[in-house]
Amino acid sequence: GAGVSQTPSNKVTEKGKYVELRCDPISGHTALYWYRQSLGQGPEFLIYFQGTGAADDSGLPNDRFFAVRPEGSVSTLKIQRTERGDSAVYLCASSLTDPSSYNEQFFGPGTRLTVL
Amino acid sequence: DQQVKQNSPSLSVQEGRISILNCDYTNSMFDYFLWYKKYPAEGPTFLISISSIKDKNEDGRFTVFLNKSAKHLSLHIVPSQPGDSAVYFCAASGLNSGYSTLTFGKGTMLLVSP
């Protein structure tokens, strides 16, 4: 079956602009996660959705970052007034849900965001 | 403050030999540990995991060892193959976060030469 897909694969924007990054999870996965991987670092957690609601957004760096998942499937990560420090690969993952144990997270290929 | 540390940025091994990748963690609430493998321009893919109730988990050529008292885990690949060349991330999770988030190390780039 299809894995997690992310669009666009690459996004170049100018400082101060607004960007949207899209994630299509694996069908049937109720949990969806966003991570950010900066150069030379491992992925860092941003936000986790359970269904339509953000269950944990403690990783969002500031209020310029926002994410939605209105129908419990596709999610959009939105970044306002982009800064050069936002340049990174943004990874999306999805999983089934069982809060009593770990659920394998399947990652998409990521969107490489470059802010000039 | 990094909670998951991979202190070796890179490792070079000859084909057929053993590769040993190390990882240390500081958060005592972590009780589930994973290794992910990542090729360029692809997302991380799950490789192997271990629960804190075990000290070893084996899957084919891959074995993960966990030393809870030392807060240390390692991934052994034997025999190493050129196709194993990739970046390997150690990650940890815990019941306190509902196992919903992963904390990753910075990764170790493994190069297996023929």
Image (cartoon, rainbow, N blue to C red):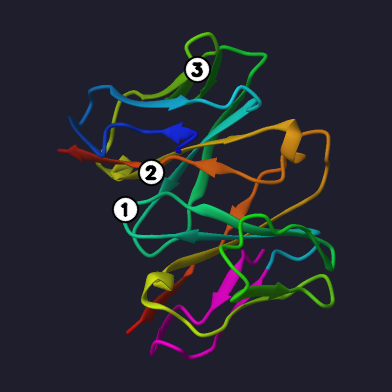
Amino acid of disc 1: Gly
The chain ID associated with circle 2 is B
User: Could you classify mark 2 by the number of other residues whose Cα lies within 10 Å: few (under 14), some (14-19), or many (20 or more)?
Assistant: many
Question: Type of residue at label 3?
Answer: Lys
* Mark with earlier residue (2, 3): 3
For the residues beneath circles 3 and 1, the answer to whether they share a chain is no
The quadrant in which the N terminus of chain A is found is: bottom right
Residue B104 makes an appearance in the image: yes
Q: Nearer the viewer, residue B6 or A4?
A: B6
Q: Is residue B54 left or right of residue B47?
A: right
* Above or below, comparing residue A7 to residue A28 in the picture: below
Give the left or right position of residue A6, taking residue B31 as reference: left
Q: Is residue A29 visible?
A: no
Q: Residues within 10 Å of mark 1 (few under 14, many from 20)?
A: few
Residue to which mark 2 is pinned:
B106
Residues under labels 3 and 1: Cα distance? 23 Å
Assess disc 3: are there few (<14), some (14-19) or many (≥20) residues with their C-alpha within 10 Å of its C-alpha.
Answer: some
Q: Is residue A83 above or below residue A52?
A: below
> Disc 3: which chain?
B
Residue for badge 1: A40
Q: Are marks 2 and 1 in contact (CB under 8 Å)?
A: yes
Mark 2–mark 3 distance (CA, rounded to whole Å): 17 Å
Amino acid under disc 2? Lys
Q: Is residue A62 above or below residue B70?
A: below
Q: Which residues are magenta?
A: A1-24
Residue B71 has which mark? 3
Q: Does residue B109 appear to the left or right of B94 in the view shown?
A: left
Q: What residue appears at the point 39 percent right and 72 percent down from the top-left corner? A: A87
Q: Where in the figure is residue B21, as x and y percent of width and height? A: 34, 28
| Residue A4 inside the magenta-drawn segment | yes
Residue B106 screen position, x and y as percent: 38, 43
